[in-house]
Amino acid sequence: MDSGHAQWQTDKESLHIFVRTPSEWANMIIDFVQTNGLAGTIYTFYELHSGDLTSNSSIHGISPEVCLRALEVLKASGKVEIYYSEESMDETGVKFL
């Protein structure tokens, strides 16, 4: 777990194993944003993990849980703002700075 490839779930009874760490996914997401000139724009959480926006990228299909953890890494480093939706997580907005 020290490598960041595993994390206990909140119930402390199950363990989430990552092929890539949330930090690695965060780097892939920010690389995608920079390569495609998407900074300064707001996208939905769904568009990032499963939408047409990312359909031809390596981040397409990332699990929503891992995507959220990666976005939290980016938020902590000041690279995104997250606008949580009361309706559903998929409608949550993400602005890349």
Image (cartoon, rainbow, N blue to C red):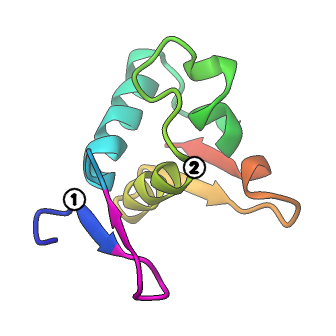
Figure check: 10 above or below 53: below
Residue closer to the observer: 27 or 14: 14
Figure check: 31 above or below 57: below
The picture places residue 72, in percent across and down from the top left corner, at 45, 61
Disc 1 to disc 2, C-alpha distance: 17 Å
Figure check: 59 above or below 92: above
Give the quarter of the figure containing the N terminus.
bottom left
Can you name the residue that lies furthest to the bottom here?
12
Can you name the residue that lies furthest to the left here?
2
Figure check: 6 above or below 44: below
SS at mark 2 in the image: helix
Q: The magenta stretch spans which residues? A: 8-17
Whether the magenta-drawn stretch holds residue 11 is answered as yes
Can you name the residue that lies furthest to the front here?
13
- For the residue carrying disc 1, how many other residues have a C-alpha within 10 Å: few (<14), some (14-19), or many (20+)? some
The picture places residue 44, in percent across and down from the top left corner, at 71, 41
Amino acid type indicated by mark 1: His
Res. 70 in view: yes
* Most common secondary structure along the magenta stretch: loop
The residue that disc 2 covers is 64
The residue that disc 1 covers is 5
Can you name the residue that lies furthest to the right here?
87
